[in-house]
Amino acid sequence: MICDSWKTELDIYLDGEMPSAETRALDIHVHSCPSCAADALARVQMKRSIQAAGKRFTPTSEFRRRVRTSIAPKPHRSFGLTWMLAAALSLVVVASSLSTYMGIQRTRGEQAYSEIADLHVAALASSSLVDVVSTDRHTVKPWFQGRIPFAFDLPELQNSDFSLLGGRMTYLGQTPGAHLIYDVRKHHISVLVFQERSLAAGLDANFLSPKKPPFNMETWSQGGLRYFVIGDASAVDIDRLAKLLKTAS
């Protein structure tokens, strides 16, 4: 079957390791094939379950303290040598702490990008792309009232290449948010909006994965809200839509 060759590429596609041209082709296929869409959605859900399970085994600060205490050098009779050892150990601890902090921030960034990309792929793979179908922002925006704990503004799209397809509820971890779908030249773009204070700290423009991502994305904070714009459209189109959203807000 023709789908068999596509399904062998799904894991590479979801991990962001597929060349951009092949990513676009598979994205179109997943959106039009119910079998591959269901398979992609199941794999996305499995990835998120594994990520959630991994969080349960993060070392605690008390565990790190006990490890540092156990490897600390014993007191020495020579004051000079003791001082040098203490200074060296302090440098090691500072360097280790900094490295650990940077590693944690990098891991959080990669995980956050992965989760946002998963939400985009899951929406495209869903049998129902949006819950409220409308090109009118005055219809889509009120639909979210009472469903999410914040309000946001949508841009006027006249004289632009973008069209609004509708919106749906979404969650990043346990945080509820709005998921809007826009279209530009047959490319779907997801716009996700969450309350900034409900998300993990440090999700700025530098949090993207060091790998070459399969999607272009921009993120920013404005008015207490965190915006994500992601899709396989060009970086120029992603930037243009982001600017329209910033102006509307």
Image (cartoon, helix red, strand yellow):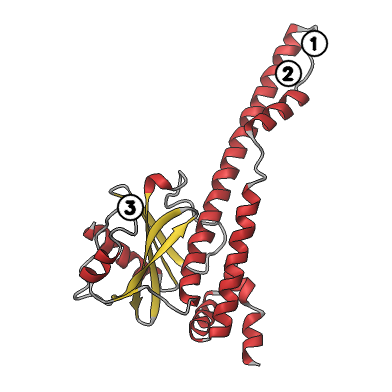
Q: Is residue 68 above or below residue 103?
A: above
The amino acid type, in three-letter code, at marker 3 is: Pro
Which residue is at a point 43% across and 70% down the rendered structure image? Answer: 231
Which residue occupies the foreground of this view, 199 or 94? 199
Residue marked by disc 3: 149
Label tally: 3
Q: In the rendered image, which quarter is residue 99 located in?
A: top right
Label 2 element class: helix
Label 3 vs label 1, nearer the camera:
3
> x and y percent of residue 72 in the render?
75, 22
Q: Nearer the viewer, residue 41 or 83?
A: 41
- State yes or no: discs 2 and 1 in contact (Cβ < 8 Å): yes
Which amino acid does the dot numbered 1 rest on? Answer: His
Is 142 placed above or below 7 here?
above
According to the picture, the residue beneath numbered tag 2 turns out to be 85
Work out how far the residue at label 2 is from the one at label 3, CA to CA, in angstroms: 54 Å
Residue type at the position of mark 2: Leu
Sequence-first tag of 2 and 1: 1
Give the residue displayed 73% in from the left and 29% down from the top.
67
Q: CA distance from mark 2 to mark 1?
A: 9 Å
Please give the name of the residue rendered at 19% of the width and 75% of the height, measured from the top-left corner: 158
| Residue highlighted by disc 1 | 76
83 sits left or right of 223 in the view: right
Categorize mark 1 by other alpha carbons within 10 Å: few (<14), some (14-19), many (20+).
few
Examine the rendering and report whether any part of residue 97 can be seen. Answer: yes
